[in-house]
Image (tube, grey):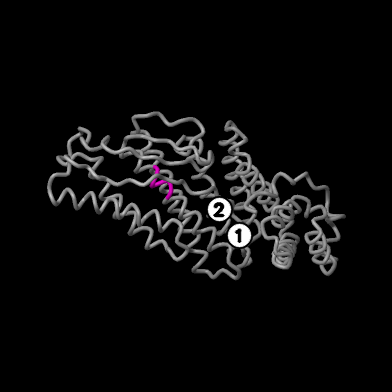
Amino acid sequence: MTHWFHRNPLKATAPVSFNFYGVATTPAATKVCNDLRLSRTQLLELFTDSSCNPEMMKNAADFYFSLLQGFILSLDDSSQECKLRYIQNFKWTDTLQGQVPSAQQDAVFELVSMGFNVALWYTKYASRLAGKEDITEDEAKDVHRSLKIAAGIFKHLKESHIPKLITPVEKGRDLEARLTESYIIQCQAEAQEVTIARAIELKHNPGLIAALAYETANFYQKADQTLSSLDPTYAGKWRKYLNLKSCFYMAYSDPRRSSELRIFMKALKETALSTKRHTVTMARLYWQVINVGKQSDLCRNQKNFLPRLKHCAKNMEKPKGLGLLPNLLDIFSLGN
């Protein structure tokens, strides 16, 4: 089953030279600084390399972070801070607030910002893989694994590194607790989507699928509520996606609708492919799931159902006889 995941953009950063003249006075120290600069550049390039896979990302991130730890941890394993921690200034933009950068002269800020981007890369890799047609079982496992890794990174940063920042995190920025928590919950919900899709394909007990769907809907609802106090100018699209998925899986949670939903999802997939309006069509038609259980003629008139959806999608019309639709014009810009 093809999945549709909304993604915020990656964080951008200014180049860092790591040239510490007068400080790095030995060949070994100079080599470490050169390795830092090169490994940072290589890691940033992998974020936008479509051929990058999780193994490449892990190796590059591990190498860079292992070098960066030398600017954070004391060499004698004492509780004192490393004297190099505040020697370099780092600038990073925000996933929600666009090109407005934050700057801190703190290696921990670099660690959490780069780690945040690594986690985002895993979510984007999962999204790219999940959007393929006829995804295999192994690929579905890779999607699930990548989302779990991303959630783990977000959680580790939130609990172990962000609290160590000297400069308080600005409200509404990436490293703030509300945003990191929402990313964690979204990753959990999307990983469970993969589980649900697999359960449907294997024709597991409808009651089990309904229970998983109900839990997934609550995950999305919780993530949405976590963002409710943020400025809608920045978090509006993200919240609409979370609300969309919450409604969708809440509809799925009624086992009495399982047969209707299978018919609907097949029609939805074919419609999206035939109209070549994947995101817009999915956004418009996902909402029909809410009313699918009310359509008594759906199962009996399968031949008419798909043509109606295709016609409406091509002409961007609201399907008649499929229940009342909310105004979704403000959602259509999601990823399109």
Residue 35: image quadrant is: bottom left
Query: Could you classify mark 1 by the number of other residues whose Cα lies within 10 Å: few (under 14), some (14-19), or many (20 or more)?
Result: some
Q: Which residues are magenta?
A: 113-117
Q: Nearer the viewer, residue 141 or 161?
A: 161
Query: Could you classify mark 2 by the number of other residues whose Cα lies within 10 Å: few (under 14), some (14-19), or many (20 or more)?
Result: many
Q: Secondary structure at mark 1?
A: loop
Among the two numbered marks 1 and 2 on one chain, the one whose residue lies closer to the N terminus: 1
List the residue tagged with mark 1. Answer: 3
List the residue tagged with mark 2. Answer: 190
Q: Is residue 170 left or right of residue 310?
A: left
Residue at (17% x, 44% y) in the render: 24
Image position of 315 with respect to 107: above or below: below
| View extreme (left): residue | 26
Residue at (43% x, 45% y) in the render: 154
Residue 148: x and y in percent read 46, 53
Image position of 120 with respect to 91: above or below: below
Residue 235: image quadrant is: top right
Q: Is residue 217 left or right of residue 291?
A: left
- Marks counted in the figure total 2
Residue 181: x and y in percent read 49, 40
Q: Is residue 189 magenta?
A: no
Residue 200: image quadrant is: bottom right
Residue at (42% x, 63% y) in the render: 52
Q: Nearer the viewer, residue 18 or 179?
A: 18
* Whole-number angstrom distance, CA of label 1 to CA of label 2: 9 Å
Magenta stretch: dominant SS?
helix
Q: Quadrant of the N terminus?
A: bottom right
> The disc labelled 1 sits on which kind of residue?
His
Residue 94: x and y in percent read 48, 41
Q: Is residue 115 magenta?
A: yes
> The disc labelled 2 sits on which kind of residue?
Glu
